[in-house]
Amino acid sequence: MIMIRANNISMNFGMIKALKNVSFELEAGKILGLVGDNGAGKSTLLKILCGYLQPTSGEIYIEDKRVQFKSSADAMKEGVAITHQFLELVDMATAWENFFMGREITGKGVGPFKLLDINQMKELTRKAIEKYGLSIDLECEVGKLSGEERQIIAVARAIESDPKILLLDESFTLLSLEGREELVNFLKKVNQQHNVTMIIVSHDLELVKNLTHKIMVLRGGEKIFYGDTEEVSVDQIVEFMLPQE
Amino acid sequence: MELANSKSNSRGKSIRNFLGEYYTWIMFIVLYIVAGIIVPNLFTSTTMVTILVQGTTVCLLAFGMTFAMLVGEIDMSIVAVAAFSPMISIMLWEAGLPVPLAMILVLLFGVVVGIFNGLMVTKMKIPSLIQTVAVWWMLSGFVLIVTKGAAKTGLPDAWMFMGRFNVIGRIPLLIPFFVLVLILAIIFARRTVTGRRMYLVGGNADACAAMGIPVDRIKIIAFVMSGVFAALAGYVLSARMGFVSARFAVEWLMPAIAAPVIAGVSMNGGKGNLINVIAGAYLVQLIVMIVRTGGVGGYYTDFVQGVIVFIAILINTFRERLSQ
């Protein structure tokens, strides 16, 4: 089954054409690696897929249903979760507040005046991040945590929202080598056990080769290559990415 | 031995955290005691009740301002709302509207002004400072036009009941009402989805939008809270004083800004404890009272108040820097 299909997606920022008629489709349970040089349009495409940006033209289908996201909330309702390049966390808020941002759990109360179930949110946050071997003070402001700890919270938050499609935008950047390996293993496990479709943007081509089933190379907003990861070597990917004479 | 040390360290850390969190209360209590040594009247029950009652206005205004600040905005129109809402409601009462309806209208005006401010700031992208100063002028001007500058006296008994009817000793009914409102506001901010989201939106609006939080709606609700608290402050002041005028609460604008700042509410949004705002408001109220009763001459009053508030803000800034 095709989980996501994009038809002729274009995005203009004034005179700049960030994306030019990009089309692709991805089967359910597959991981797509989106690669390209700076300004190739990777993050723009991801922001369109998660509803943060609206394309100038083009169509998106999820499970063969046409979707038009006006906001990230619309995309989340359709099961699309994302972790952004610059960690969409609120530094002043605690780990559990960040973890349940936008999907808070309520308990006692009347009608719309329900109180937050803070204990349950803390407990679920603790359990979720412990899967990554992370043990932190849940009342600590995330701005005071290390880059790796913050990254894990952001990724774990996206995974725990039980998405159909998980978008990861440079989610490995702030991790140590060990942290990267752990996250790669965890993502593989999530992909296999929960059949979550993933689209990953990363500059680390070895990591992309190791983790993904499909690769799409973008250059100057255009799709240059799309195919099975096994079909291409890292050198070939680099060649696709480089500007042509 | 090690366990005992660890327990003692942990207890010490908890006490330090508690003192750090509620330092505004410590500042208030210390200033009260020091001022009380100089002006012994401060320790009499009459003066204490007076400070408690007089502080209600600045505290309600400060709560309203805090909600705006939590989402990274400011609401300068609060003092105009505090005058406009009771004034127009009283005029409608004079035209035949029953008192209970007029009292409900006070809050409704606060809601309407809040929605207007919120929509202009979020949809038209007008900076909140500019928007709310413009609304402040407009409302104050409107009140001047309809009243020709005259104060309204002879308010109905039912209107002033809350300010004049004493429940225990010299404590008027408005005090338990005021305490209830503050408790509900604190629960709203700390324990409800919308309240918590105000902190998150003030902390990082882009992150909230990316996570599907309706940022504009949360900001509009913050302005509505600000408007409602301003209207409530206006009503409480009028019920206590027995009149309303066009320049009713103007003198409380700066204290209403200073109180949350002293209490550690970030003007950039995302941070602030409403329990401390109560202490901040009463600290400012105390400063005003000390200056007035301490024999500072008329022309010097504002200057001395400003200097003391500035010192309090400096202490807060240094404390925050040290804690970081």
Image: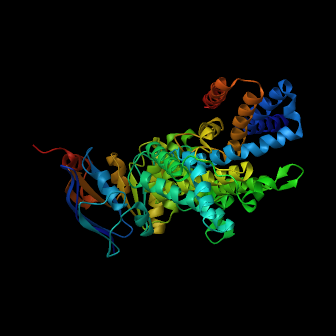
With A217 as the anchor, is B276 left or right in this view?
Answer: right
Query: To which quarter of the image does residue B19 belong?
Result: top right
Query: To which quarter of the image does residue B299 belong?
Result: top right
Please provide percent x and percent y for residue B37: 86, 25
Residue at left offset 66%, top offset 45%: B273
Residue at left offset 26%, top offset 68%: A59
Q: Considering depth in this image, is A157 or B73 the residue closer to the camera? A: B73
**Is residue B20 visible to us here?**
no
Q: From what the image shows, is residue A143 above or below residue B209?
A: above
With A104 as the anchor, is A43 left or right in this view?
Answer: left
Q: Considering depth in this image, is B87 or B123 the residue closer to the camera? A: B87
Q: From what the image shows, is residue B5 above or below residue B104?
A: above
**Is residue A240 visible to us here?**
yes
Q: Considering depth in this image, is A138 or B321 the residue closer to the camera? A: B321
Please provide percent x and percent y for residue A11: 24, 56
With A170 as the anchor, is A225 left or right in this view?
Answer: left
Residue at left offset 46%, top offset 60%: B212
Count of marks placed on residues = 0
Query: To which quarter of the image does residue A243 belong?
Result: top left
Q: Quadrant of the N terminus of chain B?
A: top right
Q: Quadrant of the C terminus of chain B?
A: top right
